[in-house]
Amino acid sequence: MKLLRRQVLLHPYVTEKTMNAMSGTPSQDLKDGNRLEFVVRRDARRPEIKKAFEERFDAKVDKINIKISKDGKHAIIKLKEGYSAEEIGMRIGIF
């Protein structure tokens, strides 16, 4: 069953660690930055998550990592060079 794109990304997951991953802090290597984390539907797959994110935020995705936790399925989305996780975070009200 194909999911509607607006149903794939449920909400951003915001913690101190995910805030640091948006920009990368001096204690982190730069390659660890420019990431956002979202809680997604359990049945969502990487291609669906990528397409939903790119269409919703007009940004290109470099890589998606998935983790399953007790509060749901999380997608850690790394953006391609030239796109800013901080800027997207500001648009969706994380800051």
Image (cartoon, rainbow, N blue to C red):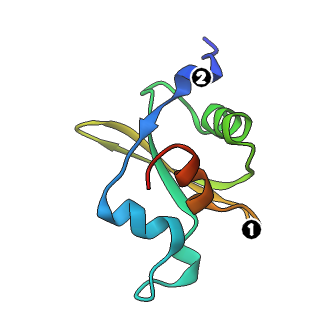
Q: Give the residue at x 66% y 32%.
A: 52
> Helix or strand or loop: what does disc 1 sit on?
loop
Kindly identify the amino acid type of the residue bearing the numbered disc 2: Arg
Amino acid type shown at disc 1: Glu
Which residue lies at the image location 47% right of the left edge and 46% below the top edge?
Answer: 93
- On residue 27, the disc is none
Q: Which residue is label 1 attached to?
A: 81
In the image, 55 versus 67, the foreground residue is: 55
Residue 36 location, x and y as percent? 51, 54
Disc 2 crowd rating (10 Å Cα; few below 14, some 14-19, many 20+) is few
What residue occupies the far left of the structure in this picture?
Answer: 70
Q: Secondary structure at mark 2?
A: helix
Decide: few, some or many residues near mark 1? Use Cα within 10 Å; few <14, some 14-19, many ≥20. Answer: few
Residue where numbered disc 2 is placed: 6
Taking the spot 64% from the left edge, 31% from the top edge, the residue there is: 48
Q: CA distance from mark 2 to mark 1?
A: 25 Å
Q: Residue furthest bottom?
A: 26
* Residue in the picture at 54% in, 26% down: 8
**Foreground of the two, 94 or 22:** 94
Q: Are marks 2 and 1 in contact (CB under 8 Å)?
A: no
Horizontally, residue 32 falls left or right of residue 48, namely: left
Q: Is residue 47 above or below residue 34?
A: above
Q: Is residue 10 above or below residue 18?
A: above
Q: Residue 42: where, in percent of width, then height?
A: 42, 27
For residue 1, side relative to residue 94 (left or right): right
First-in-chain label (2 vs 1)? 2
Q: Which of the image's four quarters has the C terminus? A: bottom left
